[in-house]
Image: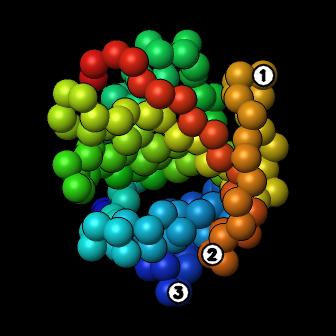
């Protein structure tokens, strides 16, 4: 069952098993607000078990580009096109959120972003590979983020 993310009334629906569920819900709401304001897109997620193609696509990019395998359980995912860009998001039980921004035009920007919920440790599989910058969010507290540029075609 899909869920429209509300960034006015933040809910932990679908994220309850996360030890940082409230912070992860704030992070998810922060993303929903961004896409509503920038692209007039309604940010809707579904259980990762129903979004297997999206999860597999993101996992393939991580594995092929950087030999990364995320050990945390994916809870929710979404995939959509807005502004000529294919976006995919996965929200993990650990509090990690991964997004892929893949411009559909050949010469466009393509990247994978990592965001860490307030209160979670940097996952071991990312700790030695990335430095995380901090940003403040009214919805999510302190978000730590990093990214890498995608070089291949997916």
Location of mark 1 (residue): 128
Q: Residues within 10 Å of mark 2 (few under 14, many from 20)?
A: many
Q: Position of residue 136 (x, y in %)?
A: 71, 67
- At a point 49% along the width and 23% down the height, the residue shown is 62
Distance of label 1 from label 3 (alpha carbons): 36 Å
Check the picture and name the quadrant holding the N terminus: bottom left
Which one is in front, 123 or 139? 139
Secondary element under disc 1, as helix, strand or loop, is: loop
- At a point 77% along the width and 38% down the height, the residue shown is 122
Q: Residue furthest front?
A: 107
Q: How is the image coloured?
A: rainbow
Secondary element under disc 3, as helix, strand or loop, is: loop
Q: Residues within 10 Å of mark 1 (few under 14, many from 20)?
A: few
Q: Quadrant of residue 51?
A: top left
- At a point 71% along the width and 22% down the height, the residue shown is 129
Q: Mark 2 vs mark 1: which is more N-terminal?
A: 1
Which one is in front, 90 or 151? 151
Distance of label 2 from label 3 (alpha carbons): 10 Å
Q: Position of residue 25 (x, y in %)?
A: 59, 67
Check the picture and name the quadrant holding the C terminus: top left
Location of mark 3 (residue): 9
Residue 9, relative to residue 72: is it above or below? below
Which one is in front, 94 or 140? 140
Q: Is residue 138 left or right of residue 15?
A: right
- At a point 28% along the width and 34% down the height, the residue shown is 108
Residue 116, relative to residue 152: is it above or below? below
Q: Say whether residue 50 is visible.
A: no
Location of mark 2 (residue): 139
Q: Quadrant of residue 46?
A: bottom left
């Amino acid at each position: 069952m899909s869920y429209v993310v509300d960034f006015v009334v933040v809910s932990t629906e679908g994220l309850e098993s996360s030890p940082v569920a409230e912070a992860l819900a704030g992070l998810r709401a922060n993303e929903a607000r961004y896409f509503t304001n920038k692209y007039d897109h309604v940010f809707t997620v579904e259980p990762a078990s129903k979004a297997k193609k999206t999860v597999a696509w993101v996992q393939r990019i991580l594995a092929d580009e950087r030999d990364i395998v995320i050990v945390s359980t994916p809870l929710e995912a979404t995939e959509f096109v807005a502004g000529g860009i294919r976006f995919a998001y996965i929200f993990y039980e650990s509090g990690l959120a991964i997004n892929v921004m893949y411009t559909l035009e050949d010469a466009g920007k393509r990247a994978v972003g990592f965001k860490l919920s307030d209160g979670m440790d940097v996952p071991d599989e990312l700790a030695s590979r990335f430095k995380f910058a901090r940003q403040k969010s009214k919805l999510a507290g302190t978000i730590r983020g990093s990214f890498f540029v995608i070089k291949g075609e997916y």
